Amino acid sequence: MKYWRERMAVRLVMAVCAGLFLLSACQSETGEMKAAAADAIVVKDIRGKEVRLSEPAQRVIVLYQGALDGMYMLNAEHTVVGIQNNIYTNPETFKYFSKLDPRIARKELPAPGNWETSTNIESVLALKPDLVIIASGQTDAIRLLESLGIQVYAVSPQNNEQLFEEIESIGKLTGTHERALELLAYTRHKLDEIAESTDHIEQKKSVYYAWSGGRIYSTSGQNSRMSECFELAGVNNACTFEVDQPNINPETLIAWDPDLILLWSTDPKVLYDKKELAVLTAVKNKNVHVLEPPFFYDPHTLKIMYAAIELHNVAYGANEHFDLDENRRDIMTNLYGAKATALLE
């Protein structure tokens, strides 16, 4: 009898020990899960959607040109495994991105989609990305990618603050947050410097902006990146509509009668050949300007500040604070670091 009591006691002790071990293991696992959750990278994209990574992304597909440009500013290009096809098909874009990345020069980086039209989901999946950065307007592609468990960061900044948030978030997602803070500190300082030199203008000139590819009657409204650029340059946006990208007719443009017309990747001859626009003040005075090469003026990037400087000089004449060559070198060097040398050749 004594023997059985001793065996029962031993079993009881072993059971208690086993229970305590399991409890300890569960608590340890719960603690590790909480620690992992605490260490997770969490940001929100332009949709307000939470994007979460357990560690910085090592394989990133970027299908939006402004964001791809930002990756090189962030020194995060080593994570890029796929880009938009437009980078290869647009000669001007290819020229400068080739200087930033020899893989692009050799056309080695896969291009599984375009920034505003289509994305090949099978090609995206084959690249096994940790993260896909894509235009927010590609809703079908985003929905499908997320349903397949791919982390998607949607972009489409409409103002500087949204762009700054995008740069900082991508910096966090790619492990380059410190560099993102450096970029934003420089940009904010430069924007303040430009604003201080232009906010004294009382008689502001009006500017009409036409989209690329000869789309003269497609413009940027008050709620747009170009309008923000205009404000920084000390000019008024001739377009009075609040929407981002309105299409207008010749009569509306004639009624606005801007002092200056700004073109993007469009030969001014396309504008001058439109007989119905011959009555415009800007046309009669030959005040039509093209921002070229466009790479240096992309308003969807931090380079919007350089576009503002050139626009101010075109509208009002040379400003002692805005030497174009000096500012181009300063801005590009601060944004791209050593990579700027190739861009400025």
Image (cartoon, rainbow, N blue to C red):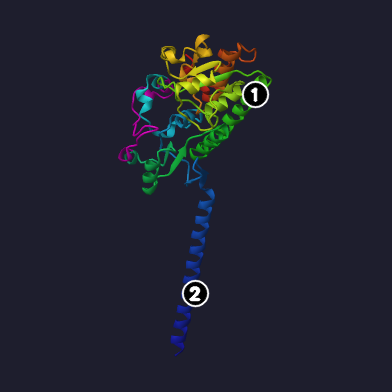
**Which region is colored magenta?**
96-123
The residues tagged by marks 2 and 1 sit, at their Cα atoms, a distance apart of 72 Å
Question: Height in image: 44 above or below 202?
Answer: below
Please name which of the two marks, 2 or 1, marks the residue nearer to the observer.
1
Give the image location of residue 276, x and y in percent. 44, 15
Q: What residue do we see at 48% from left, 81% from top?
A: 9
Q: Going 41% across and 12% down the picture, which residue do you hit? A: 273
Q: Say whether residue 143 is magenta.
A: no
Closer to us: 345 or 315: 315
Say which amino acid is labelled 1: Ala
Mark sitting on residue 195: 1
Q: Which mark is residue 16?
A: 2
Residue 221, numbered circle: none
Please, what is the three-letter code of the amino acid marked with disc 2?
A: Val
Q: Position of residue 332 (x, y in %)?
A: 53, 21
Instruction: Assign the N terminus to one quadrant of the image.
Output: bottom left
Residue beneath the point at 39% across and 22% down = 94
Magenta stretch contains residue 98: yes
> In x, y percent, where is residue 251?
47, 21
Near-viewer residue (296 or 282): 282
